[in-house]
Image (tube, rainbow, N blue to C red):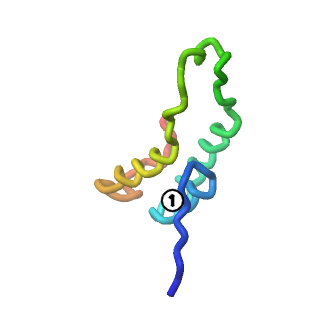
Amino acid sequence: MTETKTLTGFTKQAIEALSRANGEPDWMLARRFEAWHVYEETPFPAANDELWRRTSLNDLKLEAAVRRRRNCLRNFKGWRTIRTRRAF
């Protein structure tokens, strides 16, 4: 019997595992990794940043975002219905 390990949380490995599990094409995984790079390079706001000073991030649950995405796939029509050309 093959054991399957499910990765959870908001990590690059979890994004790759989710992409592979959903049978996404390589171009989609590449776009996800581009977005991951932006995420890693963007500094997280600090409590002393003026725009974020009164914003509490304590309730931000990134793990829930991954679970929510799985629910969105129920009505998915397939990768061939997605345009691969960038819109911008």
Residue 47, given in percent of the width and then of the height, sits at: 64, 20
Residue 80, given in percent of the width and then of the height, sits at: 39, 58
Residue annotated with mark 1: 18
Q: Is residue 33 above or below residue 49?
A: below
Residue at image position (65%, 37%) is 38
Residue at image position (62%, 58%) is 13
**SS category of the residue bearing label 1:** helix
Q: Nearer the viewer, residue 53 or 19?
A: 53
Residue 41, given in percent of the width and then of the height, sits at: 70, 36
Residue at image position (51%, 40%) is 86
Residue found at the far top of this picture? 50
Q: Nearer the viewer, residue 87 or 25?
A: 25
Residue found at the far front of this picture? 58
Residue found at the far bottom of this picture? 1
Residue 66, given in percent of the width and then of the height, sits at: 47, 49
Residue at image position (60%, 42%) is 35
Amino acid type, label 1: Leu
